[in-house]
Image: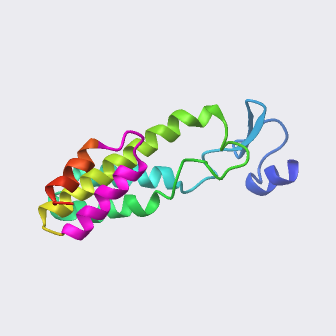
Amino acid sequence: MSGLRSTLDPGHRGGSSAAVRFVNDRYRLGHSVVAWSDVDAFLGALDAAAATDRFDRIRFLEEARRLYRGEYLDDCPYYGDSAFVEERRALLRGRFVDLMVALGERYESVEDRMSAAAAFREAVQRAPDGCPPAVAGLARLGL
């Protein structure tokens, strides 16, 4: 551990380090060490989509869509089955479903039926309740 600390925090001289912390019986990297997070980028793209004009909205929504690659920490052997991640996982899944409904509605408004249908279908697939707004979107498209 001291080798890792000295690599990540060369000025470190024993004791606690900003680069590597021990919290809840686990070692964790400090926030200053992690320069990029897919979750932060995903949420940032959603915020940008909400704040932009309607012409750039699809671009930001598609960026967020590309960043969501499945359930939060599902492939992580240390945290994936932890009850501590379930709330965040459900929140991010819900945000993704909302994203797909918004993307479907946006594609629908520019008369891109195929892209709208694909977005609505993905929302239905990911949502635990079948996503009534996406089902309604598919019905509007006649599908």
Picture quadrant where residue 100 is located: bottom left
> Which percent across, then down, holds residue 3?
86, 53
Q: Nearer the viewer, residue 24 or 112?
A: 112
Displayed quadrant of residue 117: bottom left
In the rendered image, which quarter is residue 106 located in?
Answer: bottom left
Q: How many marks?
A: 0
Taking depth in this image into account, of 110 and 61 the one nearest to the observer is: 110
Instruction: Identify the magenta region.
Output: 113-131
Whole-percent x and y of residue 35? 57, 56
Q: Dividing the image into 4 quarters, which one contains the C terminus?
A: bottom left
* Residue 116: in magenta span: yes
* Residue 108 is a magenta residue: no
**Left or right: 28 as drawn, with respect to 3:** left
Q: Residue at x 20, y 63 (%)?
A: 107
> Residue visible at 66% across and 36% down?
82
Q: Residue at x 39, y 60 (%)?
A: 65
Q: Residue at x 45, y 60 (%)?
A: 67
Tell me residue 130's x, y (percent): 35, 44
- Looking at this view, is 31 or 98 the one in front? 98
